Image: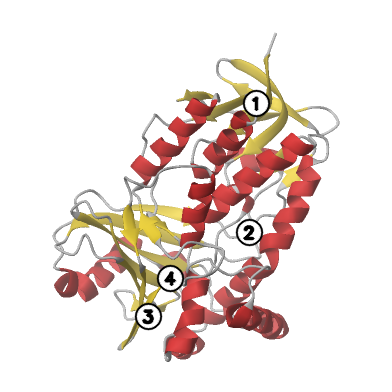
Amino acid sequence: MSERFDIAVIGGGPAGAATAIRAARSGARVVVVEKGTHGRDKVCGDGLTPRAVAALNELEIPLDDAHHIDGLRMIAGKQVRQLAWPSGGRFPNHGAVWPRRRLDAALIDAATAAGADVRFETTGDPIIDHNGRVTGIRTPQGPIAADLVVAATGAPGAVARALGAERDPNEPFGLAIRAYVESPRHADRHLEACLTIRDEHGTWVPGYGWMFPCGDGTVNIGVGALSTMKGFKKLNLNHLLESYRALVVDTWKIGPNLERPRAWRLPMSTVKRHGPGWVAIGDAAGLVNPMNGEGIDYGLESGMLAADLFLADPASAPQSYDEQIGERFDAFLRTGRRFAFLVGHPGLMRTGLRFAVGTNRVADITLRVMGNLVDAETPGAAGRTLRVADRVLAAADPLLRRTRAKP
């Protein structure tokens, strides 16, 4: 006989842990299966936006172990703008850098403390009945029945294929690589993002390089690139990282890599994020900002939302989840994907990104976009700008896609 839970979560990263914390604290029976070990590393930039900090505060996760960040320093060519995170809005005026080894451990420990049954080094695959309904998960130790299965599996893989929740092949995606280095500036209170980077051949790359100070003697150095660039399939991420290192080695006085650089894929779309008996959350739902590659905040929010809707009404939860995620994020993420095709044209990218930091007023809007502080509910200039951009890019999108660079 199979075990039975209210919710079965596949994946113990931030999104899956958020679902488990929220649901278990309200009395739901939750099981989480995580293929890694406790405290496993997850390649990431480690940066937490004020939006992510707000979500962690809502989950009552102390940030004492994280490095406090006051704002963002943006570089485009010779232009440099350093701005503080905005105050007075619905998010805190600070972010953080928290290496994923420690962040993920803190979240999954909170899920365990809340009463969730967390099983490490355990894989899970959805069990689908003859009507197409997901009724639980299959593990090496046996089947587990559940009223809701939550796919929190990150970039699409076997679980996504089984559910029909793969990446939309017509939409952009990203690749990124990071390493850790020692630097005397490890306690810097600003994230740094260079918006104009080139590969070892001098080709402009739509993406950015980052220096995220960890406050523990190290800095997370990395670069990310969008699939809309010319020659994307031939892009060597290790060489791109070394090209970026050459730009920052003197200003940050960085040492050699402390470990082998590691790369990962950034999904930015999905053809489906819910179905009978299941939902996909976080990266598995394509909830990654195409303009900065960030998704931890969306993962935390979508995980909490999935739990809340299940607790309110298990039967309608998947459909309600899809609708509410759409209302909250779809317009902004659609604009971001269209922007990805725009910056895939080198001439437009160079001009546009330099304009993005050309004045403090424009840079402030760029800051809000890079910080995931804009969505359907955003008032003021940033919200208006994104809504106008969405309309303009919607008109230009067919042309941008037809004339996109060959990857």
Element type where label 2 sits in the image: loop
- Frontmost of labels 3 and 1 is 1
Residue annotated with mark 3: 196
Of the residues under marks 4 and 2, which one precedes in the sequence? 4
- The kind of residue tagged 3 is Thr
Q: CA distance from mark 2 to mark 3?
A: 25 Å
Give whichever of discs 1 and 2 has the lower sequence position. Answer: 1
Res. 286 in view: yes
**Residue type (three-letter) at the residue carrying disc 2:** Ser
Of residues 237 and 143, the one drawn nearer to the viewer in this rendering: 143
Instruction: Look at mark 4 in the image and give the residue it sits on.
Output: 85
Residue at image mark 2: 269
Give whichever of discs 3 and 1 has the lower sequence position: 1
Residue labelled with disc 1: 27
At label 1, the amino acid type is: Gly
The CA span between labels 3 and 1 is 49 Å
Q: Residue at x 40, y 60 (%)?
A: 95
Q: Callout 4: helix, strand or loop?
A: loop
Could you tell whether 394 is left or right of 295 in the image?
A: right
CA distance separating discs 3 and 4: 22 Å
The percent position of residue 326, horizontal first and vertical second, equals 73, 59
Q: Is residue 293 above or below residue 260?
A: below
Label 1 SS: loop
The quadrant in which residue 221 appears is bottom left
